[in-house]
Image (cartoon, rainbow, N blue to C red):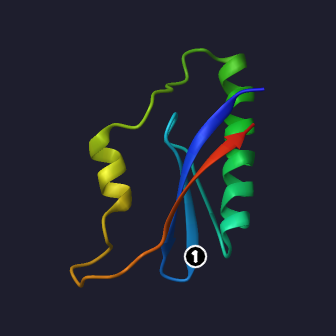
Amino acid sequence: MEFYTMVLRKSKSNWVALCLENGLVGQGATKDDAARKLREAIESFEEEHERNRDVYSAPLSIEELHEFLSVEGKEPVIEEYELRAVHA
């Protein structure tokens, strides 16, 4: 079983989970919903990647992570972040 690293952040009324190893995203009303949807996306991606090795897969760059963590809009906002390990 592989594990992946996810970063969770609040985005308005939803939670967004981002996988650092491949850039996949899951979104839900709660942290657990977002994490579950990310796991589903990872499993689906892994199945497709096994069938077709030409499917692009790469870790997130620092710039992409910074963009994900940046506040939406220009007003300063206090946001919650969480780092978790995902077993998929």
Residue 9 drawn at (x, y percent): 50, 66
Q: Quadrant of residue 59?
A: top left
Furthest-left residue in view?
74
Marks counted in the figure total 1
**Is 74 positioned to the left or the right of 17 in the image?**
left
**Residue at 46%, 27% in the rendered image:** 58
Q: Kindly state the secondary structure of the residue where label 1 is placed.
A: strand
Badge 1: few (under 14), some or many (20 or more) residues near its Cα, within 10 Å? Answer: some
Q: Position of residue 28 (x, y in %)?
A: 66, 69
Q: Quadrant of residue 63?
A: top left
Outermost top residue: 53
Residue 52 falls left or right of residue 71 = right
Type of the residue with mark 1? Asn
Residue at 74%, 38% (x, y): give it.
87
Nearest the eye: 63 or 41: 63
* Residue sitting farthest toward the right: 1
On screen, residue 35 above or below 72: above
Q: Is residue 31 above or below residue 53?
A: below
**Residue under pointer 1:** 14
Q: What residue is rendered at 25% in x and 82% in y?
A: 76
Q: Position of residue 22 (x, y in %)?
A: 52, 35
Q: Quadrant of the C terminus?
A: top right
Q: What residue is at 55 percent from the left and 23 percent from the top?
A: 55
Above or below for 2 versus 39: above
Among the 4 quarters of the image, the one containing residue 69: bottom left
Expressed as whole percent of the image width and height from the top left, the position of residue 42 reads: 67, 39
